[in-house]
Amino acid sequence: MKTFCILSAFALLGTCAKPKYTARIQTLKDNIKLEDSTFVISYANTITSDELSTHLYTFSSKDFEGRRVGEPGQKKAAQFLKNYYESEKINSPYGANNYFQNIPADFFSDGFKASENVLAYIKGSEKPEELIIISAHLDHLGINEEGKINYGADDDGSGTVAIMEIAQAFNMAKKEGHGPKRSILFLHLTAEEIGKRGSEYYVLHPAFPLENIITNLNIDMIGRVDDIHKNNKNYIYLIGTDRLSKELHYISEKVNNTFFNIDLDYRYNDERDKNQYYTRSDHYNFALKNIPVIFYFNGEHTDYHQPTDTPDKIDYKLLEKRTKLVFATAWQIANQAKRLEIDANNKYLN
Ligand SMILES: [Zn+2]
């Protein structure tokens, strides 16, 4: 490529013909080198369906009363997460035992009470200022008008317990001297169900500068199978992957193709898709700040936003596999030599 460029420069008196877009994309793809393949799989394998199931039966139990923003059940859910990180000895970015980012009631409308995001953090060993955020929302719909609890096992108990297991895996790696080079924030957001308000608050009051966030991997519903995939449950919808960073898209694909072979379904990533899921979960508040995102999603099902979204209906083996995909993708972004770039800064594309 270099030779071509020099010759053209000579021939065209100083102008340099750009390689075709497809060739530039190919160069970008060719330059993605996966990090530590043996480690990533051995730590991914600490993520188990048994542990995911144990966490989820608690998190979506009746004790948590559907986790409605600001209500006692949601507070219990936040406390449950805090207790978990304390027991795992995974720190908070705020220090000591202060895992909550408190959001005052007056930030919400419609009479919702004060609530909190829950933050846990593993500091990077080489580039600690650069940050990967893995997020899921901890709140749900609470109790409906008939007095039935909306358990929200899939929405978003599945994403919540996935993060718990991912954090544990990274922490185990760190203890054994293989911690992430960049920092990772495990961000459990409140108030998603009332308009993504927890993530809106977070980007207004970030624990670390927004410009240091490399990517947001947001998980919202990954434990079930929708009607479209009844006959092939080895899938996940990915939304947003290529909108701001083609590098992110191809990293995600390479990690999946190398380790997992899940069918990555991009139908909802189509900008003309009528559902507009890209705008409908917490990652969108990061995307609006020009931060590349991936939204991991299994699609809607008949129990979506119903009291019947219960933990017995989760496919735990599938949840495990999808969780491992998020973990391995985060591992690559946290450990690769060069910082993930948005397209505008990517030399291969410009
Ligand atoms: Zn959700």
Image (tube, rainbow, N blue to C red):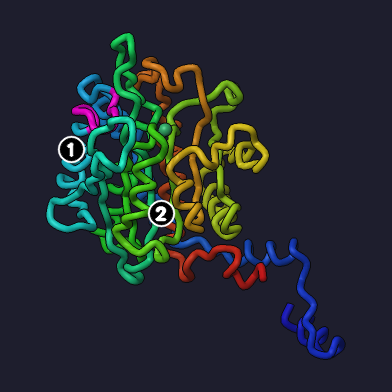
Mark 1 CB within 8 Å of ligand 1: no
Which picture quadrant has residue 77?
top left
Provide the secondary structure element on which disc 2 rests: helix
Between 328 and 72, the one lying in front of the other is 72
In the picture as drawn, the residue positioned furthest to the top comes out as: 146
Q: Which mark is residue 225?
A: none
Q: Residue at x 36, y 66 (%)?
A: 181
Q: Residue at x 19, y 36 (%)?
A: 80
- Residue 293 seen in render: yes
Query: Which of the two labelled residues, at mark 2 and mark 1, occupies the earlier sequence position?
Result: 2
Name the side, left or right, on which 70 lies relative to 335.
left
Q: Looking at the picture, how far across and down is residue 220, in whole percent? A: 43, 36
In this view, 298 is above or below 271: above
Q: In the image, is residue 31 part of the stretch drawn in magenta? A: no
Quarter of the figure with the N terminus: bottom right
**Magenta span:** 66-74
Q: Looking at the picture, how far across and down is residue 36, in whole percent? A: 43, 61
In this view, 301 is above or below 177: above
Q: Residue at x 37, y 16 (%)?
A: 307
Location of mark 2 (residue): 40
Provide the secondary structure element on which disc 1 rests: helix
Between 216 and 328, the one lying in front of the other is 216
Measure the alpha-carbon separation of dots 2 and 1. Answer: 30 Å
Q: Which mark is residue 79?
A: 1
Which picture quadrant has residue 237?
top right
In this view, 345 is above or below 329: below
